[in-house]
Amino acid sequence: MKEIKSNKKSVIKKIFIKICRLFGYEIIDQSDFFIPTLNKSINDQISIKGVKSINLPLGEVKITRKVKSLDIIIRTCSSVNMLTQNKNRIFEKEKIEYTLRSINSILKSIKYAKRSMDELLFKVFIVDHNSGQENLGKIKNLIEKYSVQFKIYNLNIKDFEEKIKKTNQKNEKVTPNQISNMSNIYKSLQISKENSSDLIYFVEDDYIHEEISISEMILAYERIASLIKKDLILCPTDYPYLYNKAENTQIYLGEKYHWRKVNETLCTFLTSKKIVENHWKKFTSMCEFEHYPFESPLHKIYEEELCISPVPSLAIHCTNVNSIFGLSPNINWKRLWEENKV
């Protein structure tokens, strides 16, 4: 006689899962780490953007600071190899190669984030100085391959020359390359003020990102901002110079990464329009006078606002291999480089 198996336990299990979903509870099968209430594995993205951040075994954090949009403002200049150094970058390629791979990594990361954040509005702005029509065409063609709104600005340094002091804090003459850099940052800030409504990611064209980077930054921002009850600043890079001295810090949990409080960064960071507006004079002072170090105005802001960076890094800064401001430790640099070939 054929054995007839009862499905009574299966029916009860389905009812129990529905009840848990109804009351907002999550359950996990410890035998295979499957979460039936979410129909996901523990290794998947289990947080629900704008609703709750889930981190096992800590449970969930209700999201009170929802991210509505992200504007990514990329500063490009494929005609200048290194701003302040004469050494070659890692991999020793022409600057346009770093620009294209950096942009490609960001676009791939946006595409990845859209899988679980399709309601979020992404826009990309390119602020370019002196890249030439051929290279600008390459940049435009690359972005057009992705479904993202974008706009390219050609930087006019004359719009900012009168705002920039020609002598820096060391009492030295400010170089033309630095003037173009300061002008580009100034233009990026203006674009954020005129166009952005929520989060803004200011990024240079020599940062190659992990595919998960945009998603992790958004989910970490929501979680941590909801916990501390205020906006903050994220830097995607774990800079080597941050390990030159021992200092106290604070550790936060994001979606898949740990984040730590830092007091210094370079000029690639993500923050909110609210913080940009609240600290507008400090941000623009970085573009009007060359401080030493250059990012000093940012560091002043970090005395008032929380700034965090990921461990390990979400993006590598493609400078010289010996630069303390460049390649993040314990990262497979070559893998990231090769994965983002255009």
Image (spheres, rainbow, N blue to C red):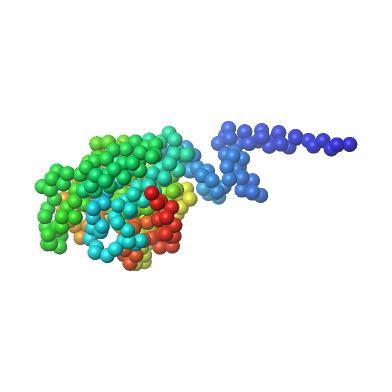
Residue 21 vs residue 215: left or right? right
Give the image quarter of residue 17.
Answer: top right
Give the image quarter of residue 198.
Answer: top left
Relative to 120, is 237 above or below?
below
**Image quarter of the N terminus:** top right
Residue 259 vs residue 153: left or right? right
Q: Position of residue 162 (x, y in %)?
A: 10, 47
Q: Residue furthest right?
A: 1
Residue pictured at 42% horizontal, 49% vertical: 213
Q: Position of residue 324 (x, y in %)?
A: 32, 64
Q: Position of residue 299 (x, y in %)?
A: 27, 55
Q: Position of residue 281 (x, y in %)?
A: 20, 46
The answer to which of 331 and 243 lies nearer the viewer is 331
Let me know if residue 169 appears in the view.
yes
Residue pictured at 58% horizontal, 45% vertical: 41
The answer to which of 86 and 136 lies nearer the viewer is 136
Residue pictured at 40% horizontal, 51% vertical: 340
Let me know if residue 274 appears in the view.
no
Q: How many marks?
A: 0
